[in-house]
Amino acid sequence: MSLLVIGTVAYDTIETAYTRRENVLGGSAMYFSIAAAKYTKPALVAVVGEDFRPEHTKLLKDNGVDTQGLEMQKGRTFRWSGRYEVDWNTRVTLETQLNVLETFDPKIPQEWRAAKYVFLANAAPAVQLRALEQIDRPSFVMADTMNLWIETSREDLKKLLRKVDAIVLNDEEARILTGERNLIRAAGMVLGMGPKYVLLKKGEHGAFIMGSDVHFSLPAYPVEQVIDPTGAGDTFAGGFMGHVAASDRCDPPTLRRAMLWGTVTASFCVQGFGPEALVARTQAELASRYDDLMTIVSP
Amino acid sequence: MSLLVIGTVAYDTIETAYTRRENVLGGSAMYFSIAAAKYTKPALVAVVGEDFRPEHTKLLKDNGVDTQGLEMQKGRTFRWSGRYEVDWNTRVTLETQLNVLETFDPKIPQEWRAAKYVFLANAAPAVQLRALEQIDRPSFVMADTMNLWIETSREDLKKLLRKVDAIVLNDEEARILTGERNLIRAAGMVLGMGPKYVLLKKGEHGAFIMGSDVHFSLPAYPVEQVIDPTGAGDTFAGGFMGHVAASDRCDPPTLRRAMLWGTVTASFCVQGFGPEALVARTQAELASRYDDLMTIVSP
């Protein structure tokens, strides 16, 4: 069923302890849609600059992403540059150039206003709200956010939280949003802010989903060699929402399975720079790793 | 079936961000045996000093521990003092007084030399080896260790690893032992050193077991309020081995369930100082939390 993501497409410069890559295709909506396209046909709404390379639009299309909502504007594409420490747990942002993102005002293409499943990738909550207003009657809306918005746009974020079905947060964001260190209590407090479900990501330590009718926790898939963790969170969300949309249901058993699909999809993402490792994976490879993960986590 | 633990009994002084407690009953064999006694009748081999209080021997007996191997020697009981930082992940040892432990030479009581299940709690590998030599033909031996021995007694430790069925390590120990940061690769390297199974503990992030016939990973039980994490690792081992011994088998399905019982038992341990919270728990309460955990981790 119809799945829509509103977010960013970017060019990233990534430094790891081992190597450095410039102008890697990046952005939340890019990672999300490439991931979700393994399970359904998602549409992406994002803005890029005149420097955006046609081969990258082609890559999105070739990988099953509907790009009619990919708007090109005067100026340069959003750029992010960051460095990972050797343990992968510490990421330092070296530079952010908003460029065309500065004036981004998402416009949902007419045929996508009826989307049933929606992911509002990390953006200013006011922008996320404007995007959400354009969608008729979505069945399941999930939003992402970041520390910056928790600290600078808390009121807008609280408004957003009352309008979405699920929020995805990492451990640090959950703590900053609630002021509570214990993640279980923090998740409970976030549920009190409005959403039916909280997806709490703990990086290499896995993730859990909590809501009134579901509490499911699982470890990350055991990847032996991480190449680049950029986009793992959005890829997780893409796998999760891709499965929900493909199943066209959001009952607890579906949400549990979606957590596994999100985990599996993200595990491929970190095995290459940008989307390269994920793009190269077939559905059969994803399914095989899903079976592995099922074996690893089943008591 | 018969379960034997060789380790320490101690008096601990524990500082947390919230409070401080002196002379809390502690020690690896104490935590292990109190935990294991929820599932079977374990025997403990350890040494205490003349200051060891009779009420604490009574506490062990009342909780189902066979204490005939609890030797009293001249001098004072082993003492440890440590402080936890507010995030619980950092523990600083403030003081260690070996006292009677300095000359500890474990003597396994005659009737326990036929034990089928054995836990060699953290001690100098040479001491662990001397204990193991006294046991006839154990079915399943698990050992614990610590950074100190990895750094100072590596050859003895390697000898020990070739003689045990399972080794339990935390993430830091696994990394120091192997020089490998990635825990999956580190676990694989430890398997190459001899044991059939590695149990890798990640504290609040759960644990996994790896061997040629099993790979099972699970999150920690979501405890909302930690009071004192001291002994959680030994309690985990106690719940694990208690279940294995009570089942009298060590096939992969049993080992998987044992990981859940270890997790559940440890989750009660951290909810009070020393063994107090665990002691107060009934088997019905343990079983109820086991069911909760099963729900939380089942895909």
Image (cartoon, coloured by chain):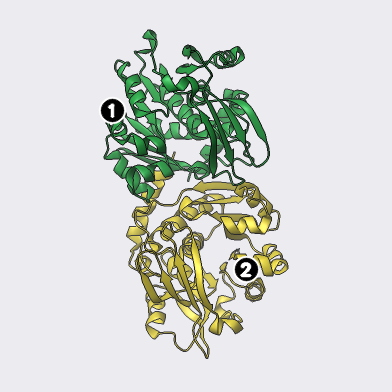
Chain colours: A green, B yellow
Quarter placement of the N terminus of chain A: top left
Residue that extends furthest to the top in the rendered view of this protein: A110
Tell me: residue B150, above or below residue A236.
Answer: below
- Viewer-proximal residue among B266 and B134: B266
Left or right for A222, reference A214: right
| Residue B36 in view, yes or no | no
Q: Say yes or no: labels 2 and 1 on the same chain.
A: no
- Viewer-proximal residue among A114 and B84: B84
User: Residue under mark 2: which chain is it in?
Assistant: B
Q: Residue at x 40, y 30 (%)?
A: A254
Quadrant in the rendering for residue A94: top right
| Residue position marked by numbered label 2 in the rendering | B148
Q: Residue at x 33, y 63 (%)?
A: B282
Tell me: residue A297, above or below residue B259.
Answer: above
* Element marked by disc 1: loop
Amino acid of disc 1:
Lys
Residue A256: x and y in percent read 41, 35
| Residue position marked by numbered label 1 in the rendering | A163
